[in-house]
Amino acid sequence: MNINKENISEAEEVLRLAKSDLIAFGKLFLPNDFMRSETPAFHYEVADSTDDLETKQLAIIVPRGHGKTVLTKCSIIKDFVFAPELLFYGWVSATQKLAVGNMDYIKHHLEFNEKIKYYFGNLKGPKWTEEDIELRNGCKLISKSNVAGIRGGAKLHKRYDLIILDDFEHEANTITPEARAKNANLVTAVVYPALEPHTGRLRVNGTPVHHDSFINNLLRNFSIAKKEGKKFSWHVITHKALDPDGNPLWPSFFGKKKLAEKKKFYRDSGQASKFFQEYMMEVMSEEDAMWRREHIKKWEGYYEHRDGFNYLIQDGEEVPINTFIGCDPATDIDTKESDFSVIMVVGICPDNNLHVLEYERHRSIPTVGSKSLNGEILGKKGVVDFIVELYDKYHCTSATVEDVAMNRSIFQAMNDERRRLNRFDIAVIPEKPGGTQKRNRIYSGLSGRFSMGTVHIRSNHFDLEHEILTFGPRMAHDDTIETLYYANVHAFPPSMKRNKEKTGWFKPKRKAKSWIVA
């Protein structure tokens, strides 16, 4: 762009346009990055949300190489050169090398970009290091390679006006459940409190790298809120590299041919799932999944107990069921904070279809809740309390609980509770893992049901559906699907038949057989 230095009105028009539009600013002042290809529609969507000061929490979850970091660099430079007052930003990258490289980009353009110097003058300030710079107008940027480093920076200036977490999750820091829990805790307990209370903004750029990563949980929670019509505290922008019709998100730069090349590379390298992770926002591909959506049936209706029998009512038609409980308690001291205790009720109908009626899924709950002298719960309910409550609610036949050394307290507490309530009709079956590797056991116990399409869940059973679809060696949690296994292992259908008019059900009476043919 050639600028006529004598034409003041033209210069003012350039500034007006650049100030109000991030993409225009990029094309005018950073053409090497913004003029390489036609700007895709989703870049304008990201730019509008980035410029919106009312958007306090913004998550940009799009494929690798689709311009997240370039837009971030551009937005920082734009905000600083047009800043009406001093701004304090923090920027976290995946590695020290990336953090330094990003800072070098910002410093280079503020120091040597001729167009920026022409319009805004010399902006280099008193501090100009590889991870901390301060401009002449007072704006300050700190670039770090780990989230924890953000905490100390706020003491140097003021609370942050904006913190950007740019691909802060990667394979190296999401290996263990503890590492993933630490990432989430740093965002909520370190980064969020470091922001200006009323005006501070938080932006997360990334792609999901693990089923239990912060980014993937954000996507999942956003999807749940969207389905349920609830407000979500984050403004989430997420796109796949290819839409359901096979059209590319960025046709001029990542067209069908380029994406096909990448997909072939990953497949030929034995890493087909990586393409789906990096470009389709799916940590496990449909090709690698053991069970797909077509293996799961959904049901809507309600449960009813009448005349000593349990029924499912769907579309006005009632079907008798036997009900059973499965329980996978998290009692191991090493995993109690990261794993879930799950108690699930299933119903089995005469056709041997399994319907998941309800489940409780909680972190950090006790074996049994503390009670007052009259039996009222004090504080949290425990695993035993949920078993008793659901057993009564659904008139269950039995409850199956995983029997390992760390779970013995469950059986002891259950016996004490049955004695206290005088409820020895509550049948609890201890089920030993038997030395089988957990996921092999789950697969062998449920694969027959899934392959025959006999598993029915409700549309709001998000955790169970997620674990079914991501079942495999790299899944985040298997507590819910393992509980489904335990609920199913001793389940059986009711011995009831329809009457001749097909209007009701009855339990056939046993008839004595002749000793000759018996």
Image (cartoon, grey):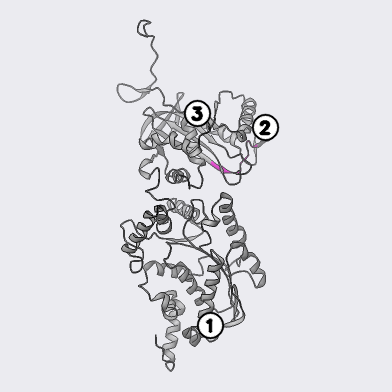
Q: Quadrant of residue 247?
A: bottom left
Q: Distance of mark 3 from mark 1, alpha carbons?
A: 73 Å
Residue at numbered disc 1: 111
Q: Which numbered disc flags the more N-terminal residue, 3 or 1? A: 1
In the rendered view, would you say 309 is above or below 477? above
Characterize the local packing of mark 2: few (<14), some (14-19) or many (20 or more) Cα atoms within 10 angstroms.
few
Task: Look at the image and give the residue range highlighted in magenta.
Answer: 361-369
Amino acid type of the residue that numbered disc 2 sits on in the rendered structure: Asn
Characterize the local packing of mark 1: few (<14), some (14-19) or many (20 or more) Cα atoms within 10 angstroms.
some
Residue beneath the point at 59% across and 25% down: 423
Between disc 1 and disc 2, the foreground one is 1
Secondary element type, mark 2: loop
Q: Quadrant of the N terminus?
A: bottom left
The dot on residue 396 is 3
Would you say the residues marked 2 and 3 are in contact, meaning their CB atoms lie under 8 Å apart? no
Residue at numbered disc 2: 374
Q: Position of residue 453 (x, y in %)?
A: 36, 37
Q: Position of residue 241 (x, y in %)?
A: 37, 60
364 in magenta: yes
Between disc 3 and disc 1, the foreground one is 1
Would you say the residues marked 3 and 1 are in contact, meaning their CB atoms lie under 8 Å apart? no
Q: Which numbered disc flags the more N-terminal residue, 2 or 3? A: 2
Instruction: From the viewer's perspective, tell me whether residue 321 is left or right of residue 476.
Output: left
Amino acid type of the residue that numbered disc 3 sits on in the rendered structure: Cys
